[in-house]
Amino acid sequence: MAQPIWQALISLVNLDHQALAIAKDIKNISTQISEKERELTNLSSTLKTHQEELKELRKKVGLVELRSKELDALEKKKRAQLDEIADQREYRSLQKELEVLGMERQDLDDQLINAYHQVELTEQKISDEKTLLAEKEQSINKIIEELQQQTNDLEKKKEELRSELQAKIAALPAEWVERYNRMKGRVSDPIVPLHNNSCSACFYIVVPQDIAKIKRGNLVSCRNCYRFLYYDKTEEKETSAEAQY
Ligand SMILES: [Zn+2]
């Protein structure tokens, strides 16, 4: 005996639900993959920023060192001049200039100490970040690979479900498929059992002639919510047995 329509439709609903669940899982996994990829991108962009910073710091050190050398030459020259000057006024003014140069020297030395320290800190930071990035890259790539494998498995399962669904649909009368598809777009449970002579989804009391039809194995639309109602002897027995506890 062929499967009654209601049973065929229920298995259609089940397959549809499975397909939806799989699609949701695939989406979740894809989100996870993007998050992991973003984590790596963020790490490498931080590293890049610090590498740029280091470049700037080294440039600054180079400039200060250059100015320092210039200052050395200048001081040397002025000291030599100082030895040859006889005039007191000129001597004092040259001494003044040397004092100013001395202040600049102090300032440059401070700048250099500070810049060397910054370079050292940034180099350490970059080295730590490189290590972290390498570790993360390894672990994240492994995770992504696993997630991709999961996605592939799910896609395969989805494909299998699709052909199973198509086979079921092909076996059903076109009219029912159309009605089913219409209902499916509105509710997630388009087919529900008759329970205590009511629709088990909206609890609308079913009229006696519909009950009779349903109990003969026909599918009838609920006059309130339009879901398809079916009657499953075993299901109703089980539910009423449960209710007794
Ligand atoms: Zn209903």
Image (cartoon, rainbow, N blue to C red):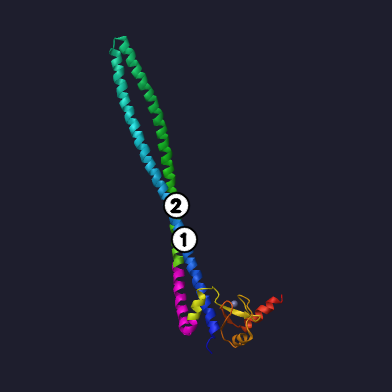
Quadrant (top left/top right/bottom left/bottom right) for the C terminus: bottom right
Magenta stretch: includes residue 171: yes
- Is 215 or 69 nearer to us in this picture? 215
Quadrant (top left/top right/bottom left/bottom right) for the N terminus: bottom right
Image disc number at residue 55: none
Measuring 34% from the left and 31% from the top, which residue is drawn there?
Answer: 65
The image shows residue 227 at horizontal and vertical percentages of 56, 78
The image shows residue 44 at horizontal and vertical percentages of 41, 50
Identify the residue under disc 1. 31
Highlighted range, magenta:
152-177
Magenta stretch: includes residue 153: yes
**Residue 106 as seen in the image, left or right of residue 239:** left
Quarter of image, ligand 1: bottom right
Are the residues flagged by discs 2 and 1 in contact, CB closer than 8 Å?
A: no
Answer yes or no: is residue 98 visible: yes
Looking at the rendered structure, the secondary structure element under dot 2 is helix
What is the C-alpha distance between the residues marked 2 and 1?
A: 22 Å
The image shows residue 207 at horizontal and vertical percentages of 63, 84
Q: Is residue 196 above or below residue 78?
A: below
**Residue 62 as seen in the image, left or right of residue 20:** left
Measuring 51% from the left and 69% from the top, which residue is drawn there?
Answer: 21
Q: Which amino acid is tagged 1?
A: Thr
Image disc number at residue 135: 2
**Residue 224 as seen in the image, left or right of residue 127:** right
Ligand 1 has an atom within 8 Å of the beta carbon of the residue at disc 1: no
Q: Is residue 233 above or below residue 87?
A: below
- Is 21 or 223 nearer to us in this picture? 223
